[in-house]
Structure formats: structure tokens, C-alpha cells
Image (cartoon, grey):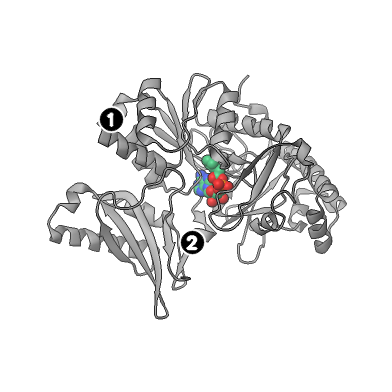
Amino acid sequence: MSYWDKEKECMSRSDLEKLQLRRLKETVFRLYAFVPAYQQKMDEAGIKPDDIKSLDDLKKLPFTTKNDLRDNYPFGLFALPMSEVVRVHSSSGTTGKPTVVGYSKKDIDTWAELMARALTSAGASRLSVIQNAYGYGLFTGGLGVHYGAEKLGASVIPTSGGNTKRQIMLMQDFGTTVLTCTPSYALLMYEVMEEMGVSSSDLKLKAGIFGAEPWSENMRREIEKKLGINAFDIYGLSEIIGPGVAIECYCRKGLHIAEDHFIAEIIDPETGEVLPEGAFGELVITTITKEALPIIRYRTRDLTVLNKNVCECGRTHVRMEKVLGRSDDMVIIRGVNVFPSMVEHVLLNIPGVEPYYLLVVDRKGNLDQLEVQVEVSESVFSDEIRKLEELGAKITKELESALGVSVKVRLVEPKSIERSEGKAKRVIDRRNI
Ligand code: DLL
């Protein structure tokens, strides 16, 4: 069984659209019939399932937001009775009640297949030894990757996150060839490897499949250099299914969204208007094969660009650019939008800077202030004050010219910024406190 599924992944656009329309209609009918909250939303929007006659009609349907899931907490948006739900997960939200998502037996199979496809797209095979250091539990990362890797027939090492020294020992002893975790955890692994005196040449690692948080191209280069691997970006979110919604292929020119299961749109996050292909905006996703929790036009809050050109790899599925960031993580400093990934990209071009940073936003009087805390390398830190000052001035200049806003740079000691075994926290906003 091959998970390089050319029939589905290289389908012509017209066949793909026919398939999407058929599946969309089924999904909308089921939601209207079985989920009172959706019926109400559609009635309010003045639209009936029969009104969906073309893919273009999708835009008539109302959006779904995280609030809809919260308002119907925990299982109110499920389209199947709990007797048909075999698994629940929840999103990694830190405040309030989590958003809860459910899966039927078939949903779990679909997800495993999508993940097997995603791992294949990043070059993994049944010969791979996959160390899965995404957290197992309510978070979708661990079990999502796990089921896909097993379906692929690879050997899975389910380490989950944490216990980094043991991760490295196992990586050496078990001959791990593929590492799956967040990009920030991959960096921490390297740091611990250094402490343990383990170099990338002591490992068999060939590839990393990293996601669950935004990471810049320069971060990719940094990780690839440090671990001596190829790093692939994987995207997903629990509300839609989990990891495996989109993945890079070997061309690494965007992440293919599995369009036989999802329909992607880009909207203007302010007005909700659908934007043309190539425009930068908020990604909106509709599931068209999910059974337990079908979702129409979910506002992901993730900002990106779509490209429908056929990829060099042969896949026809639309590609999304690396996510620049979540609109929730965007800080607006005196009217200028700043994303942590933009700061990261600039910092990692500067020698002497370590890939650890934090944006601290505060308000002095009526003025917003952005402080960027930047970790410097051991050698730089022990240098003369004058050199540190020069480095600080250089970082300030480059950040200010890239972001278009004034920035206060604070150089901090090596290893003083908190490390992450999962999703890194990049922003502290003190303005609301
Ligand atoms: O993070 C699912 C996942 C697990 C994806 C493992 C990839 C790997 P949630 O916890 O629901 O699900 O968080 C979803 O994380 O809306 C994005 O803001 C962010 N995110 C996920 N993947 C990427 C990525 C999982 N590759 C939220 N680049 C999403 C940027 C990402 N952001």
C-alpha cells in the first residue's frame, strides 16, 4: 500500500472541484439535519442546503469560529451521537474552557491516512524510524502523527514531549531517522545534545517534520544546519482534524492542503470578504469528509497566501505559504502589525544571536512600546561591553528597518529565555494588565 496517492493528490482541478462540490453538499445537508446550532446559523443567514449548487456558493455559508465551539461546549456541534464518537481531543488554548473536538471511527481512519500521506510527502517510508516527540494526550500532535506513522508502516517511537536527555539517548540507540516535534523543541534538543557532547553525526537523523507553531525560513535553516537534516513544515489544527491538514513536499515551496478532504479560502480578516488567489489574508477551512465534527468555513486566524499552480512534485492540491502567524499573536505597535516570525527571521540573519527571543509589549502613557529580548551566544556575551553595544545597535537598526516601527532591544544572557518542549510562547503583552 502506497501513501503517495497520485490518484487523489494529482487529480485535475476540474475533477477535484467536482469531488469537493459533491462532498460539500453532503456535509451541509448533514449539518443542517443533525446540528441545531448550524441549522440556526444557516436559517439566520437565509440559506438552505439546496442553495449550494456550486463551489462558489460556499461563500454564502456562515463562518464558524472558536466561539461557536465554546458556546456549544463540550459536544454541542457534534453531528453524531456519542455512541459513534471514538475519540475526543481538545485545542491547546490556555484561557477558559478548551475547544473540544470529536472523531468517529472513520474520522480516525481518514486522519491516519492523511498523516501517512503527509509523512510520505516529507520523504518518510516504512523503513523510517520515527521518533514522535509531539505531546500525547488531548493535544492532537502526538496521537495524530502516531496513527499516521503506524499506517505508513514506519517504526514509531512514541516518546511524547519532555525528558530531553532520554530523547537524545533513544535517538542514538534506536537509530531514529525522522524526528517529529515542534520547531522550538527541535532547537532545545540540539542544545541538550551539545551539553551531552552528542553531535548530529552521531545520529542517523535525516528529516524533521515540524509544526504546531509558526517558524520562519531562517529558523528552518538554523535547525537544518544544527541537526544536519531536512526540515519540513506540517500544518494543522484540532478544530479541522489535527496535524496533516497541510504538509510540504520535497520542493518545499508551500504546504499542500489535502483538498480532497478540505476546502480552503482566504478572507480579509476585517471584513470577512473572500479574497482572490494570491492575496494575503486569513485562512478559512471547510471539512468535507468529517463525520463527528464537520465544520463549515472555520476561521483559523492563521495568516497566509494560497497558490493553485501545479507543483513541481506533480501534486495539484493548493499550496499555502508558511503561516506568517496567528492574528491573535500579531502585536499592533502604533498601528504597525508585527509578527514574532518577522522578528525571528531578522534576528537569525545576525551572527552572534541565538534563536531564542521574546516580544514584550507595554504601554507607556499613550504610547505602545515593543521590547525585543534577544539571547546572545556565550562568546558574544563574554565579549567587551563595547562589542555588545555594537551588536545591540545593529539588531535595533535591522529590526526597525524590517518592521517599520521603533524597537527597544534587550540582549539577555545565554539560556535565560524559557525553552519549550511544545509550542513556544513568543509574546508577552502587558498592555491589558
Ligand atoms: O497544533 C496541530 C498540529 C500538531 C499541527 C502537530 C502540526 C503538528 P492546535 O493545538 O489546535 O493543533 O493548534 C492549531 O497551531 O491554528 C496555528 O495557529 C498553529 N499551527 C499549527 N501548525 C502550524 C504551522 C495543532 N506549521 C494552531 N505553522 C493553528 C504555523 C501552525 N502555525
The picture places residue 363, in percent across and down from the top left corner, at: 41, 74
The residue depicted at 77 percent of the width and 43 percent of the height is 21
Q: Quadrant of residue 48?
A: bottom right
Residue pointed to by mark 1:
199
Q: Nearer the viewer, residue 23 or 179?
A: 179
The picture places residue 168, in percent across and down from the top left corner, at: 36, 30
- Which kind of residue does numbered mark 1 sit on? Ser
Q: Nearer the viewer, residue 280 or 262?
A: 262
Residue that sits furthest to the bottom in the current view: 365
Mark 1 Cα-neighbour bin, 10 Å: few <14, some 14–19, many ≥20: some
The picture places residue 203, in percent across and down from the top left corner, at: 34, 25
- The residue tagged with tag 1: helix, strand or loop? loop
Query: For the N terminus, which image quadrant?
Result: top right
The residue depicted at 34 percent of the width and 42 percent of the height is 222
Q: Nearer the viewer, residue 263 or 114?
A: 114
Residue pointed to by mark 2:
330
Q: Name the N-terminal-most of marks 1 and 2.
A: 1
Is residue 320 visible in this depiction of the protein? no
Horizontally, is 335 left or right of 306 in the view?
left
The residue depicted at 85 percent of the width and 51 percent of the height is 49
- Which kind of residue does numbered mark 2 sit on? Met
